[in-house]
Image (spheres, rainbow, N blue to C red):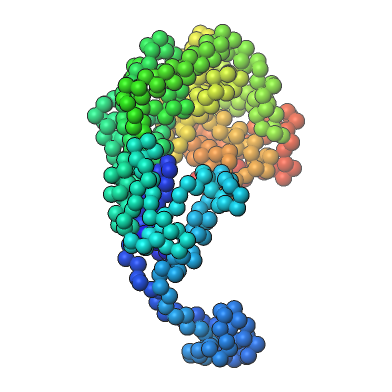
């Protein structure tokens, strides 16, 4: 493979078992290079130090336009690669990695094989000419030339190009029809298979008694399946007998749905009021009290925003699902499942919808809450989150924003500009801060509500 430091890879192939880089049109050798050093007037001491740094004698330095320098002679690319390829592998970084064997390379997963070819020749310490095909359908195969890497893998049951794997998966899902991907797992699925096989399967219809979003979340969060509507789902497998694959995945999903059903029913038996009563034992933020404290601030804030009875009732119950077992298992369901529990407890639809939509908009182009109580509660929640973070001196710095405060600020702007919600922001921040102080929060002595207002205005 033609690859070197300092050039762009022509193609990059990433899959569950391999990372490969293909670089085309490399020269046979590096160009002659002039490395400028100190000016002649800097004297012998500077010249001798520069010469030592570059491993040459003082009298080998060349003067150009009053500057001393060294001329680096062309080197064969094969020699450059042999010296530098190990550093490329060692330089790949991952959020989680470890050394898998004594003296080995720190990497995300155990390194089973390494291959480096310059055209048809192995490079440096990488003396092998072989790679491995599909885990089950292809064994060790020889790569005769770097340019034949992809065709060799395809003949061994591996599609190395993630763009092509994506195309194959989407085309197969489209052929089945009716698929959706609400949790956005497609990008991950593309990287989980080497030779995608897309199959439609079914689970037991009794699990349709679960709220649809609960079933879909169990489907996607744990198993990366694609809902097809009703009791049908699509699985992207890595080959195998279709009937065996369908049966196995259906059993796995039904086990997940059985767990979700048990947890959901237990939460419903407890009831949303009892869940809300447990909030005093759940920490919201260190220094800012519990979710019960958060609830009390939200009730006051929705009143300050101008919310009515539905808004106040929604604020009182908004965080109840933080005590729900289903949210502990599926954090993605917070808000939504609280709305479901409110419906099942007989609360008005306006209250249930406001609880369900309290985190909207949750993205720059995401939908706004559809009701006034929902907009009011969403605004109060975002104002309180911003106030708490600034009061605890946890303002975002640089690109770091672990609490999503920029997203919250953008959401407030959209609620005001697109949602028509009138927000006297500085007054509302002052209300939230006053409540924090009254609750005994560890607020910063230098807190200034104008900083929150300016932060939101910058969005």
Left or right for 238, reference 361: left
Residue 270 against residue 200 in the figure, above or below? above
Residue 415 visible? The answer is no
Left or right for 140, reference 59: left
Q: Residue at x 60, y 53 (%)?
A: 103
Q: Quadrant of residue 28?
A: bottom left
Q: Nearer the viewer, residue 187 or 283?
A: 187
The N terminus lies in quadrant: bottom left
Q: Nearer the viewer, residue 167 or 137?
A: 137
Left or right for 121, reference 397: left
Residue 249 against residue 14 in the figure, above or below? above
**Image spot of residue 448 (x, y percent):** 67, 43
Q: Residue at x 75, y 30 (%)?
A: 440
Q: Residue at x 47, y 17 (%)?
A: 255
Q: Nearer the viewer, residue 234 or 391?
A: 234
Q: Quadrant of residue 176?
A: top left
């Amino acid at each position: 493979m033609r690859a070197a430091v300092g050039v762009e890879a022509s193609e990059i192939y990433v899959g569950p078992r391999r990372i490969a880089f293909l670089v085309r049109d490399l020269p046979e050798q590096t160009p002659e290079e002039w490395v400028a050093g100190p000016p002649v007037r800097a004297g012998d001491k500077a010249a001798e130090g520069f010469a030592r740094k570059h491993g040459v004698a003082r009298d080998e330095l060349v003067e150009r336009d009053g500057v001393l320098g060294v001329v680096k002679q062309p080197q064969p690319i094969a020699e450059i690669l042999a010296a530098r390829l190990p550093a490329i592998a060692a330089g790949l970084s991952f959020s989680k990695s470890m050394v898998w064997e004594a003296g080995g390379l720190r990497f995300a997963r155990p390194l089973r094989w390494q291959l480096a070819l310059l055209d048809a020749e192995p490079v440096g310490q990488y003396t092998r000419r072989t790679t491995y095909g599909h885990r089950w359908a292809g064994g060790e195969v020889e790569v005769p030339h770097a340019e034949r890497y992809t065709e060799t893998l395809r003949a061994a049951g591996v599609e190395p190009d993630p763009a092509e794997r994506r195309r194959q998966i989407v085309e197969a899902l489209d052929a089945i029809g009716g698929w959706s991907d609400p949790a956005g797992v497609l990008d991950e699925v593309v990287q989980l298979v080497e030779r995608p096989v897309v199959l439609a399967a079914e689970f037991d219809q009794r699990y349709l008694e679960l709220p649809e979003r609960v079933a879909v979340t169990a489907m996607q969060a744990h198993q990366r399946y694609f809902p097809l509507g009703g009791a049908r789902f699509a699985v992207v497998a890595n080959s195998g007998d279709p009937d065996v694959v369908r049966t196995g995945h259906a059993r796995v999903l039904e086990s997940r749905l059985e767990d979700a059903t048990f947890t959901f029913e237990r939460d419903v038996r407890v009831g949303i009021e009892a869940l809300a009563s447990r909030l005093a034992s759940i920490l919201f933020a260190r220094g800012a009290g519990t979710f019960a404290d958060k609830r009390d601030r939200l009730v006051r804030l929705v009143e300050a925003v101008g919310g009515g009875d539905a808004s106040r009732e929604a604020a009182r119950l908004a965080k109840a699902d933080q005590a729900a077992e289903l949210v502990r298992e599926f954090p993605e369901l917070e808000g939504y499942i609280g709305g479901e529990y409110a419906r099942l407890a007989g609360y008005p639809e306006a209250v249930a919808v406001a609880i369900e939509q309290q985190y909207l908009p949750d993205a720059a182009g995401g939908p706004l809450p559809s009701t006034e109580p929902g907009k009011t509660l969403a605004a109060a929640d975002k104002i309180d989150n911003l106030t708490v973070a600034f009061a605890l001196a946890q303002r975002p710095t640089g690109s770091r924003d672990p609490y999503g405060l920029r997203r919250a600020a953008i959401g407030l702007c959209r609620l005001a500009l697109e949602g028509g919600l009138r927000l006297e922001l500085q007054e509302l921040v002052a209300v939230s801060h006053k409540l924090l102080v009254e609750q005994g929060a560890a607020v910063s002595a230098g807190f200034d509500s104008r900083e929150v207002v300016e932060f939101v205005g910058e969005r």
